[in-house]
Image: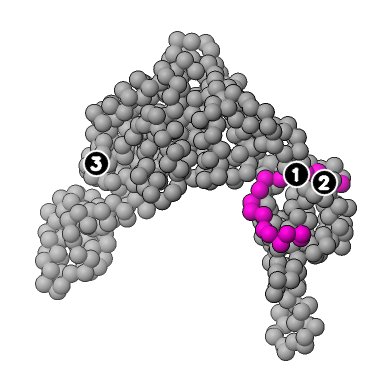
Amino acid sequence: MGIRRHIPWASAEVLRRKVHIYETILNSIHEGVLITDPNGYVIFYNQEIALLEGLSPEDVVGKHLSEIYSQPPDTSEHLRVSKTATPIKETYQKYFTRKGLEVHLVASTVPVLMHNELLAVYSVCREATHLKEMLLRTMQIQEIKTDLTEGKKQGSTHPTRANFVFSDIISKSKTMENVIRGAQRAMTGSANILIYGETGTGKELLVQSIHNGSPRQQHPFVAINCSAIPENLLETMLFGAVKGAYTGAVPTTGIFEYVDEGTLYLDEINSMSLGLQAKLLRALQERNYRKVGSVTEIPLRCRIISSINVDPLACLQKKLLREDLFYRLSVISLTVPPLRERREDIPCLTEHFIRKHSPAHSPHKKELEPELARIFQGYRWAGNIRELENAIESMICMAGEEKWLTCEHLPMYLKQQMEQERLKANKIPSQLSPSLLDTETSIVTDALKKHRGNLSRAAKELGILRQSLQYRIKKLGIDPEQFRR
């Protein structure tokens, strides 16, 4: 059936079609949307929230919120916003529907106003059950996990709470050696540690090594990425909560309580909201904390190691980190250098990742082509060790049964970035004058003649990537086949 063309709309038809358009769009997004009128009656309920709550729009639209959810009116965000016309930013909510289904959501609730008149209230939400389960599962796994390999390394049959020890850190650089020595000195104490390092430098590996070498090694180790968890959920996860602390709140054991005398690692703490930073500061100062909704003080026994991926001074200047909290967290401070400042580690790291990611059934040992090894040494590695490992893993996959890992096997983005860095370093202009084009044609032609059209050898002699030579051959209109005859 063909699509009907646009026709002039009468006023009622315009309204009907607009409603259909908006409903279609709202039913296609991956967030739940609930809209009520100023009195709390549902006027729209999209397909996503219907899936989350196990209800259907037909059973919900037209009913009052109190008919749908088992919660007191004074704890309903929608009804609160209806009274105050003040939006409630993203919060974690746990509640029950009238059918008894337990729901975990992260939602924002916002009023719709026109000329100071409240027209409606809407919530945009996403499911949080999987996030909470993931965090709880992480804690449970770390509590019961028994890694026999690590146990043998440490001469112990006790379960470990973190996977790495200092001997797992691969390095030959003096700079990294000093960092490791500082971490080893710090591991026996209880002072808070702040680690600064760019993304991918291996901060958590260092943190786990500190924990596994400390007197706290038989207690839990928990790592939390502060940028990945909504503020309200993070507060509950850290401090715990008592019944009635928020909508549908049940007694919750927080990470502080769970870790007890172990180690808590707060990664990217500069992403934590300033409000939650203030609460964390109080807990560190008093060495006590309160669960959300409680007035009872609980001793804080764990050691806190935190990290930032932004320069500490920049964090303070941009007010990403409270100054008073910074001094509390950085009683001991360590800086993990980027890979470009420890280039002597690139060969041994490369060798390690080749061994790690090579398939067990491979007929021969994979090796990095010498020319590419030289290029690796000069590259800046913005993603540091993580980028290097990802590149090696990708190359091994693309190489198949081939022994040598070459430029041909590099991920495309890495080829382009390496070539851009080479051009920048050699100050090679991207657009050449006619006389320089003739010179370039002569140079490329001579290299191809010398190596009988072998692009890899010609590129190596010219000091450029094979892909760059192919690009220049095409641009200059040179046929390499003529040199292979």
Q: Residues within 10 Å of mark 2 (few under 14, many from 20)?
A: some
- Give the residue type that dot 3 points to: Gln
The answer to whether 30 appears left or right of 12 in the picture is: left
**Would you say the residues marked 2 and 1 are in contact, meaning their CB atoms lie under 8 Å apart?**
yes
Please report the residue visible at 28 percent of the width from the left and 27 percent of the height from the top. 178
Between 310 and 287, the residue placed more toward the observer is 287
Decide if residue 226 is on the left or right side of residue 44.
left
What is the quadrant of residue 187 in the picture? Answer: top left
Q: Specify whether residue 221 is in view.
A: no
Left or right? Give the position of 359 relative to 257: left
In magenta segment, residue 91: yes
Q: Which residue is mark 3?
A: 377
Task: First in sequence, mark 3 or 1: give its number.
Answer: 1
Residue under the image location 27 percent in, 46 percent down: 379
- Judging by the rendered image, the residue that carries numbered circle 1 is 247
On-image quarter of the N terminus: bottom right
State the extent of the magenta-drawn residues as a range.
Answer: 82-98
Residue bearing the label numbered 2: 71
Q: Residue at x 37, y 53 (%)?
A: 413
Tag 2: residue type?
Gln
In whole angstroms, how far apart are the C-alphas of marks 2 and 3? 62 Å
